[in-house]
Amino acid sequence: MKSLTVLFIMLLVLSCKIGTRQPEPQWISLFNGKDLTGWDIKINKHPLNENYGNLFRVENGILKVSYDQLDSFRGEFGHLFYKQKFSKYKLRVEYRFVGEQCPGGPEWAMRNSGIMFHSQSAESMGLNQDFPVSIEAQFLGGLGTGERPTLSVCTPGTDIDINGTMAPDHCTSSSSKTFDGDQWVTAEIDVYGDSIIHHLVNGDTVITYSKPRVGPGMKPEGYPVPDGTPLKEGYFALQAESAPVEFRKVEIMDLSK
């Protein structure tokens, strides 16, 4: 009788543990398909949430970066920030380049965009600040000739290590193939605080690096965070650099819970 009581208690404890097991993290959409609720806009030369030229918009369920209401690009680099910061997560978007670059856009920005993450907040950016201090997962579209890999990494105001050594250049190319034309691409970044980061294109890992931190290059004057400070968390933003881009999915899997 005593052994049966002990067995019953053990089964009860086990069932309680199973019942309190945390659910597996799920993909959550951050884009409602209707408007820009939950997002902040910061465009160079313009105050927070002034959507100059209707640069960021939602049309027919697609989140767009569009320059059709501007006659020329005059340095209005823009960023669409999600209002919540994250530390450990997977972020996945489906994007494509469409149409022609805005007249006046720099040559290097042709079919060039990206995701800025582990970033300072939109409200902390200066009025005339081109880019947030962040890590950039760079989108590049093919130009019809030559190789142009997407989801490379760039470091505005930051540093990273690749294979245990600080990356010597502002941008480091990924191993992705080139995507010409207006085809949809699935881009994912897997971010583990200030530890390791992976970029994936259509499910394949194309670059891995580690130890994101504040660095001396391309920082605004008077930036309050010292060089070398580990980047354990931050905001992320979709970029506008004079190339029209469309997004049909923006999803996150929060790994911190």
Image: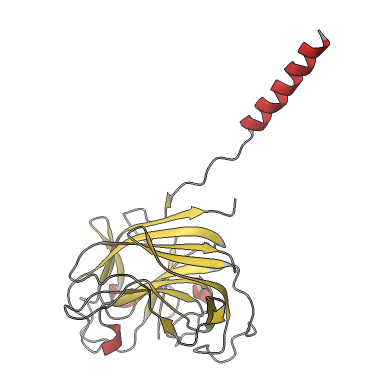
Q: From where the camera sits, is residue 51 visible?
A: no
Q: Give percent across and percent down for residue 55.
A: 30, 73
**Colouring scheme, one of rainbow, by chain, secondary structure, one colour:** secondary structure
Image position of 35 with respect to 226: above or below: above
Does 2 sit left or right of 107 as displayed?
A: right
Q: Quadrant of the N terminus?
A: top right
Residue that protrudes farthest toward the front in the picture:
163
Task: Work out whether 171 lies above or below 98.
Answer: below
Query: In this rendering, does residue 74 appear at all?
Result: yes
Towards the viewer: 67 or 131: 131
Q: Residue furthest bottom?
A: 221
Callout count: 0
Q: Residue furthest top?
A: 1
Give 45 or 249, whichever is nearer the viewer: 249
Residue that appears at 80% across and 13% down: 3
Q: Nearer the viewer, residue 4 or 215?
A: 4
Q: Is residue 178 left or right of residue 257?
A: left
Q: Residue at image x 62%, y 85%?
A: 227
**Residue 242, horizontal then vertical, whole percent:** 28, 81
Q: Position of residue 121 (x, y in %)?
A: 52, 73
The image quarter containing residue 17 is top right
**Which image quadrant is residue 98 in?**
bottom left
Compared across the picture, whether 38 is left or right of 102 comes to right
